[in-house]
Amino acid sequence: MSDLSIAIVTAAAALAGSAVTGLFGVRGAYRQAEAAREAGRLQAGAAWKAAQETSASAWAAAREQADAQLEVVRQTQRDQAAAALRQVRRTAYVAFLSRIDQAQQANRTWAENPTSTPARQARDAALAALHEPLNVVQLEGPSEVVAAAEAMKDSLHHPQPAATFQQARAEFFTQAQHALHPRPDTA
C-alpha cells in the first residue's frame, strides 16, 4: 500500500472513530440531560411536597394558636362574668344585711317596749323594708344563701329572736362567703 492509501485509510479510520466517539458523546450527553431532567423533576416534586407539608404545618400551628387565643378570650369572659356576678351578689347581700340589722334592732326595741306604738310602727316598717333586698337575694342566689336569708328573716318572729337571729346570721355569712369566694374545684 502506498503512503497515500495509508493516509486515506488512517484519515477514514480517524473520521469513523471521531464519528463513533461523537455519537457516543451525543448519546451520553442526551442520557445525562435526561437524568438531569428527571432529577430536576424529582427535586421539584420533593420541593412541592415539602412546601405543602410546611404549609399544612403552618396552617395547623396557626389554627392551634387561634384556638388557644379564643379559649383565653372565653376564659376571660367567664372570669369577668363571674366577677360581675360576685359583685352583684355582694351588693345584694350587703343591702339585705343592712336592712335586716335595722329590722332586728327595731324588733328588739319593740320587744323591750311592746306597748309603744312608735316602736311597733318602726318594727313593722323595718320588716316591710326587708322585702326588696330579700327579693334581690332570691333573684341572685344561690339557693343556700336564699335559705339562710329567709331563716334570718323568720328568726325575727321567733320567741327568742336574739339567739335564733345570731345563729341564722352566722349561717347567712357562711353561705354568702361560699357564694362569693367559691373554691376552684367547685367554681
Image: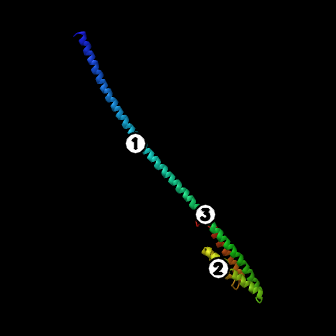
Q: In which quarter of the image is residue 20?
A: top left
Query: Distance from label 3 to label 1 (Cα)?
Result: 50 Å
Query: Distance from label 2 to label 1 (Cα)?
Result: 77 Å
Q: In this view, does 101 lie above or below 86?
A: below
| Total marks in image | 3
| Camera-nearest residue between 105 and 49 | 49
Specify the label residue 45 is tagged with. 1
Quadrant of image for the C terminus:
bottom right
Q: Mark 2 sits on what residue?
A: 150
> Looking at the image, which residue is at 57% across and 59% down?
73
Q: Which residue is at the far left?
A: 1
Question: Helix, strand, or loop for circle 3?
Answer: helix
Dot placed on the residue nearer the N-terminal end, 2 or 1? 1
Q: Position of residue 10 (x, y in %)?
A: 27, 15
| Camera-nearest residue between 40 and 95 | 40
Q: Is residue 166 above or below residue 114?
A: above
Q: How crowded is mark 1: few (under 14 residues within 10 Å), some or many (20 or more)?
A: few
Q: Residues within 10 Å of mark 3 (few under 14, many from 20)?
A: few
Q: Mark 3 sits on what residue?
A: 79
Q: Quadrant of residue 107?
A: bottom right
Q: In this view, does 185 lie above or below 135?
A: above
Q: Is residue 177 visible?
A: no
Callout 2, which amino acid?
Glu
Dot placed on the residue nearer the N-terminal end, 3 or 1? 1
Q: Where is residue 47 in the image (x, y as percent from the top left)?
A: 43, 42
Residue 38 as seen in the image, left or right of residue 74: left
Q: In this view, does 50 lie above or below 115?
A: above
> Looking at the image, which residue is at 44% across and 47% down?
52
Question: Helix, strand, or loop for circle 2?
Answer: helix
Q: Which residue is at the far bottom?
A: 115
